[in-house]
Amino acid sequence: MRILFLFFLILSPLSESKLKIEITQGSETLPKIAIVPFQNEILSGRETISSLVEANMTLFGEFNSIKKTEMLSYPNSEENFFYRDWRLLEVDYVVIGRVDNTDLTNLDINYLVFDIGLKKIILKGDISGNLNELEQISKIISNRAYQSITGLDGVFNTKLAYILNPNKNSYKIYISDIDGSNEQLLFKSLSPLMSPSWSADRKKLAYVSFERGYPEIYIQDLLTGNRSSIDTLGMSNSAPVWSPDSKYIAFVMSMSGNPDIYLYNLRNKKISRLTRHYGIDTEPAWSPNSKKLLFTSNRSGSPQIYELIVSTGRIKRVTLDGDYNARARYFPNGKDIVLVHGNDGVFHIATKNLKSRFINSISKTSLDESPTISPNGNIIIYATKKKTQGFLAGLTLNGKSKFTLPVQEGSVREPAWSPLAN
Amino acid sequence: MTNFSIGFVSSIVIHTLLFLFLTIDLTLKSNKKENFSSVPIKFISLPEEIKTITSMPQKAIKKLEPTVQSLLEVNEILNKPELDIFAQENLNADITASNLSKENKEVQLRINLIQKRINSVWKKPPLINQDIQVEITINLAPSGEILSFKLLNSSKNKVFDDSALAAISNISFLPEVINLDRRYFEKNFRSFNLVFKSMGN
């Protein structure tokens, strides 16, 4: 028998095909993260850095965090960090840190991120600032920790623009931090406001206002509050979207009752026409490289998504399946899109690769919900309603977590996620 | 007297045969014991699945069935007395097939259980319609201990590679292979590859 074993041992490396086991699904449970209280982090009654970072990391339901009371130790440096303590708690990632200089005008914060599975440090960082910047500092630490863990950009210091419609004759545009805090009123009107869109530098917002009785596109400077309308010939303008290279605003205009896609050149203020069709062309969305546009058109009889190359005007149909496909947006990779996909009266938020035919539904939705994608492409936020109360809901792309964001009174509509801060 | 001597001789022969038979059987048994005792079984208890899953679809058996049937049909048509010979052949074929299928069955069962275990600990990182995969070689001891593992083919996405490596280092044991026949273990699980895929089911 021993000889036989030996024979197998010799034979096994020679055999051509080694056993291959495929793993595709992965765990249903979320990665577990521990944010250890930072050393010297209690500063004149402010919220602690670790609790701010924890709130950020768990904001979109991408991680489960463990309570500080469950932790076996509070390490604050590499020397007193023991991997086994965290493995016992089945933690995947740990963030530790300390405030070295407690002079309140010049805080010096060092932090580390550990990968418990790999038993190694995946991020060493330090940041300085004063006490009033604590919230911003925590967002930057969260962004960097998130990036080191997921490989995606952190979006904790991005912003959200949205429209509030508290009652029939009141419309307001708000800007808030992505967690719903620090709301600022940008503009209010007795007439409808629609379709907010961010400029790439996050300094301006374009939107539609009915203040003069018909839809017009306004550009508002967020620092000064100055606003001006785009001069166009048509009587009905809508759906402005800022190109990522900040050169154009694509929008929809009806010259003779038929909406088409137009381009507004922000430098020379000239307008050029992009689509000519008797069908309705609407909801333009820029590709990340500013060379292509997605739009919705009913030219085939039902709403479908089309892609247009801006320089040549060439148009290609993108969606083939389903009797309703609309509100498409590119992912940051430029190769995938998110859209509202409907078939037989059932609507889903769905993703699709531009090269494949397959549409991948991720969440059931209702028709009037317009999704906005996070700049890192991993999270989708949409406005929805529970009875009469509107709120913002979101989900991660893997479908593992859903969350809601708090907003003020009234019905919230058309959220627009800002680009990343530079 | 003759009857008595015949009885005496035959009883000696029968006893000798019985003795030989028993000793051979015992040596066989003791041999087996030796083999199994050389496998260091550790304190880990087996998951219940191993006990409960008893019937697995077996390709080898399924393939065999039509041949048996067709042979029987041929016999019926020819109506020959050689039917018994065919039956004997079928029996032999059945034995080898069941030996083969036993290995398949045992190995496939372990594959399923290993897949299940690794799926339960692998925290797949967020990826948007990216079709990538990472291949990792694992060297296993018969006790189920992961002796070593290394990256064979990278996905070229560091976070994705790391997630797979972290999953394996979080396990450190694959007790699924403990009570597997040593030959099957050496052939299949001594060194094998895990392919972590971002897409597909």
Image (tube, grey):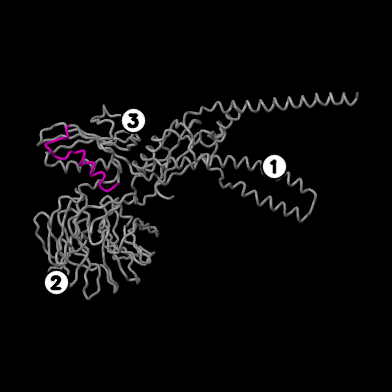
| Cα separation between marks 3 and 2 | 67 Å
Residue lying at 16% horizontally and 69% vertically, measured from the top left:
A232
User: Three-letter amino acid code at disc 1?
Assistant: Asn
Up the image or down, A31 lies above or below A192; here it is above
Residue B74: name its quadrant.
bottom right
Instruction: State the extent of the magenta-drawn residues as a range.
Output: A40-61
Mark toward the viewer: 3 or 2: 3
Quick check: do tags 3 and 1 share a chain? no
Up the image or down, B105 lies above or below A358; here it is above
Residue A84 badge: 3
| Badge 3 vs badge 1, beta-carbon distance below 8 Å | no
Residue A351: name its quadrant.
bottom left
Q: Secondary structure at mark 2?
A: loop
User: Three-letter amino acid code at disc 3?
Assistant: Arg
Q: Where residue B77 appears, x then y in whole percent?
A: 76, 56
Q: Residues within 10 Å of mark 1 (few under 14, many from 20)?
A: few
| Cα separation between marks 1 and 2 | 92 Å
Residue assigned mark 2:
A213
Mark toward the viewer: 3 or 1: 3
Along the line of sight, the residue nearer the viewer: A293 or A103: A103
Residue assigned mark 1:
B92
Q: Secondary structure at mark 3?
A: helix
Magenta-drawn stretch contains A53: yes
Residue lying at 8% horizontally and 56% vertically, measured from the top left:
A224
User: Three-letter amino acid code at disc 2?
Assistant: Gly
| Badge 3 vs badge 2, beta-carbon distance below 8 Å | no
Q: Where residue A81 appears, x then y in whole percent?
A: 28, 29
Q: Say left or right for A69 vs A357.
A: left
Up the image or down, B38 lies above or below B82; here it is above
Q: Say left or right for A305 vs B176.
A: left
